[in-house]
Amino acid sequence: MGLFSRKRSAESEVPVDDPTSGCTAIGSVVTREHVRLCGQVLGIRVRPSDTLPAYVARLGDDSGSITIVWNGRRSVGGVGLGKRLLVEGTPVSSPDGLCIYNPVYTLLP
């Protein structure tokens, strides 16, 4: 073992190939705690505005759903109805329920 390496236990090994590892169930999301969510896009709408448009998607899994908002966008590359996404961000309460604004996202196969 070198100076900067540490021994890992077999239980803590996470496959590098699996991007969905470490995802939280949407139904157990708590506000103001950074989360990593995996789910399918259930619905999409664009809030048109002259000042600040928004691309809004509803992301769901077996436990629930959450609203994802990209402010200042009329479209988001690759994000469409039925697509699977991994998103990372901090959920907040909104009139529509829990919402994550401008998350980091990855398209899943």
Image (tube, rainbow, N blue to C red):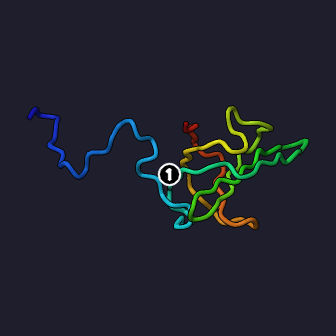
Which of the pair 86/90 is nearer the observer?
A: 86
Q: Residue at x 14, y 43 (%)?
A: 7
In this rendering, is residue 25 above or below 87? below
Classify residue 32 by image quadrant. Answer: bottom right
| Residue 16: x %, y % from top left | 35, 37
Q: Residue at x 41, y 41 (%)?
A: 18
Q: Residue at x 55, y 38 (%)?
A: 108
Query: Helix or strand or loop: what does disc 1 sit on?
Result: strand
Q: Outermost residue toward the left?
A: 1
| Residue 76: x %, y % from top left | 71, 36
**Image quadrant occupied by the C terminus:** top right
Disc count in the image?
1
| Residue 2: x %, y % from top left | 10, 32
**Image quadrant occupied by the N terminus:** top left
Disc 1 target residue:
36
Which of the pair 87/100 is nearer the observer?
A: 87
Callout 1: few (<14), some (14-19), or many (20+) C-alpha neighbours within 10 Å?
many
| Kind of residue at badge 1 | Arg
Task: Decide if residue 7 is on the left or right side of residue 55.
Answer: left
In this rendering, is residue 2 above or below 104? above
In this rendering, is residue 86 above or below 76? below
Which of the pair 76/17 is nearer the observer?
A: 17
Q: Outermost residue toward the right?
A: 50
Which of the pair 60/68 is nearer the observer?
A: 60
Task: Decide if residue 19 is on the left or right side of residue 55.
Answer: left
Q: Residue at x 50, y 55 (%)?
A: 35
| Residue 61: x %, y % from top left | 58, 57
